[in-house]
Amino acid sequence: MARIVGIDLGTTNSLVAYMKDGQPCVVPDRNGRTMVPSVVALTDNGLIVGDSAKEHLTRNPERTVYSVKRFMGKGLADVQDELVYFPYHVTETGGVIRIRLGQKSYSPPQISAMILKELKLRVEVSLGESITKAVITVPAYFNDSQRQATKDAGLIAGLEVLRIINEPTAASLAYGLQEKTQGTIAVYDFGGGTFDISILKLKDGIFEVLATNGDTHLGGDDLDRVLVDLFIGDIRDRYGIDVGRYPDHMQTVRLEAERAKIRLSDELKTEITIDLPEDKGRFTRELTRDQLESLVVGIIERTLAPCRIALKDAGLTPKDIDEIVLVGGSTRMPLVRQRVEALFGKQPHCHLNPDEVVALGAAVQADILSGGTTDMLLLDVTPLSLGIETMGGVMSSLIRRNTTIPASAKEMFTTYVDGQTGVDIHILQGERELVKDNRSLARFRLKVPPLPAGVPRIEVTFLIDANGILNVTATDMRTGQSQSIEVKPSYGLSDTEVERMIEDSFKFAAEDVNARKLIEARLDAEALLKTTDKSLVDAGHLISQEEVQSIRATLAQLSNAKGGTDPRAIRACMTELEQAAKQLNVVMLDDSLKKSLQGKKVSELS
Amino acid sequence: MEQHTPQPERARGLQMARSMCWHCQSEVTGEYFCDRCVKVQPVSKETDYFTCFGVPRRLLLDPQKLEAKFYELSRTFHPDFYQTKSADEQTISLSNAAVLNTAYRTLRNPIQRAEYLLALETGSVKDIRTSPPADLFEEILELQDTLEEYRASDRDSDQGHRLRATLQTEQEALERRKHEMEAQLQQLFADWDQLQDAGEATSLARVERDRILKQMRDLLSHRTYVNNIVNDLAATIA
Ligand SMILES: Nc1ncnc2c1ncn2[C@@H]1O[C@H](COP(=O)(O)OP(=O)(O)O)[C@@H](O)[C@H]1O
Ligand SMILES: [Mg+2]
């Protein structure tokens, strides 16, 4: 089976990992950085992703998209309150958010697909093979629409998404592989945009999730915003400037707020410096860890209620938890660790790299799916109750939250009026009594043969698969015939739209960045680098010192160009290297000819 | 939301005639796999959860053993292990795993297990309707009034405090009652298991069987009713 990679598609940072000799490893770039900032920027040279895109946050804020994960599977109304914090232009078409970049609009899955493509390219270059299959992680508390949007992003990026796996459970796989412990663990995942808590039982290689909870709109971003508001207020008071009117400076403030927050995880106080708009000079102030903590303690406490609910749902008390695993950059904050420790009454486990553990776990799950790892099995749950709308706008639950997946429920439908030919079904997700307080997932119309009221019997099966994604089928119990169902997602792309985006993404690849050419150039360069390296080792002693020097220099140039994004530059360097290594190849050929001739009779040669 | 591929014709036919392999049409004597072509077989719709777990229809089951069996069957059916198999096999693994999860959820919880057994034994698949124990009828009506009053009152007033205290006392009383009923149920479970183990087909045994099932039904119904009220109370005064 073709290789499957594991991808952590984060709000702030994304990573790709794969299984190597029974151990998961993340793929670094040439500078050794494993994290790709989840940032996409439109520049004059086309779209760019990651570290280089991050530099455009302040230079080009309207055309630089970050934290797009917050918009996955959402409608505009869901995010109205936080739009002021984003410098880029967000609108809605057909129930799906669109982000404007230059002349074009992109849905969040399309933006995410660009990040996925970058990761795909990274691992392809590193392994020298093409990658088409992936396991992608999502916050455990993601609903059906958000999961589906993630799957769409994979498709658009040219990846077959073999599994959507929950981030905290992925982390538990990596933890389990490393620690080989048994018992009950709590995974507390506090990242940039989301918070998850999952409680699992580890026994005999089975990772059974007992309960999960969280908040898909709670993360480090929210902590940064508190500081942003503080600094903006300060600047207004001191200089009478409304920074909010300057998108580029807003980004400077946001980035400085984040950096200050991060510094205060190690230091007790820090200095903040921000260049002001209109050459008004520079704003400076001091911020202490105590001040930061008193500002954000409320937000951090919002993570505790989901923890308590998860414990309750699992039928456990804090003392039943053997180990607390911390995941996500925000768990580096001392205050977060204190609160977690206070809640569970023990020190959290900190031996794993909180940035990488999710991607590593995704790689383990990928290995399970490809048949490599057979002793581990993850039994996950659905985070939210699934139900349908019934009379009076009330939701009737079919599959309760924290039910082990795959999970299915059957429901029989009939008619109320003679000759009625359809029954409308509205599918919901959530824990509240009333339809309006829950998340609308989709609607569909059940086709019914015209018969007297109450006679038709249509059985609908709601099945949540191992990805946590809903599948619906219906069977007419009188005829035994199954019918296909056209579901209309409430907050998602239709199948045709996804298909169009896949096509667009290939077209776009061909036109804009020549991504394909770049991949090929990088792959070829990689191969050339490898063979030349080997030739030098094998036959370097047969050529002059100067020649070796010159080959070494061109090798370095090529490896440098390979890390860049210009396929022509890579090709140029390759030609140069081929030139420089000409003599080396000649002597190698001679040498091998000589060797093969040795021991052969002259008669055999003629 | 994703469209589910309809179950393959062959696989569906099989759920009616279990003994033939959907793939190679040879007779299946093994539990879940065809002996000849080693393809996974769908769990029949007629298989009850006890059979699925390979345990007799008893009400006092060892949770450790149930869990071990659940893990074993999960390793047999989970879709993770069918990723490299054919689409038909993937569909079967998915639906088998869903059945397995429902079975475990039902059997793991003693109350749900008993309700399920009742449905199996008495042939009624309808949910057991909840009803208040007769002797609590008056008390519960009164309690509902107090609840209403409390909800309407200012929680921080003297009246609010008084009502809250009353509700708390009621909650404790009802919780005690719930535990009593659960103890009684536990006894009935043991009675049931003993009767089944004895395996006698006398008319006396039949009468005893009916008595146990009837009492169990009533108790389950009362217990759920009281449990709902306790939860409601707890949520209101929390
Ligand atoms: N040392 C630190 N102290 C506090 N917060 C940190 C630290 N390092 C990273 N963060 C925060 O962690 C978040 C990113 O965490 P990450 O796990 O990468 O997020 P995601 O999974 O959402 O992409 C950001 O909000 C960042 O500011
Ligand atoms: Mg994360």
Image (cartoon, coloured by chain):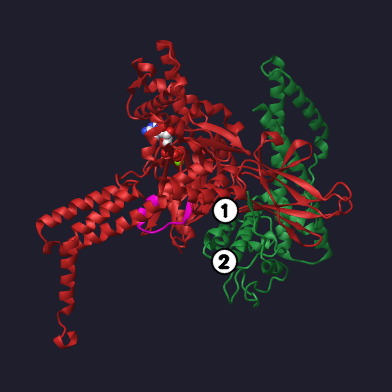
Left or right position of A267 against A547: right
Residue type highlighted by circle 1: Ala
Chain ID, red in image: A
Judging from the image, mark 1 belongs to the subunit labelled A
Residue type highlighted by circle 2: Ser
| Quarter the C terminus of chain A occupies | bottom left
Query: In this view of the protein, which residue sits in the foreground, B49 or A272?
Result: A272
Query: In this view of the protein, which residue sits in the foreground, A141 or A103?
Result: A103
Q: Which residue is mark 1?
A: A466
Q: Which residue is mark 2?
A: B86
Mark 2 → mark 1, Cα distance in angstroms: 17 Å
Instruction: Give, as a single range, the part of the protein colored magenta.
Output: A121-135
Circle 2 Cα neighbour tier, 10 Å, few/some/many (<14 / 14–19 / ≥20): few
Q: Is mark 1 within 8 Å of ligand 2?
A: no
Badge nearest the viewer, 2 or 1 = 2
* Residue B66: x %, y % from top left: 60, 57
Chain ID, green in image: B
* Residue A189: x %, y % from top left: 47, 39
Query: In this view of the protein, which residue sits in the foreground, A148 or B110?
Result: A148
Magenta stretch encompasses residue A517: no
Left or right position of A449 against A112: right
* Residue B25: x %, y % from top left: 65, 76
Left or right position of B103 against A163: right
At horizontal 45% and vertical 33% (from top left) the residue drawn is: A63
Can residue A443 be seen by looking at this rendering? Answer: yes
Can residue A347 be seen by looking at this rendering? Answer: no
Q: Secondary structure at mark 2?
A: loop
Query: CB under 8 Å between callouts 2 and 1?
Result: no
Judging from the image, mark 2 belongs to the subunit labelled B
At horizontal 36% and vertical 38% (from top left) the residue drawn is: A52
Image quarter for ligand 2 equals top left
* Residue B15: x %, y % from top left: 70, 67
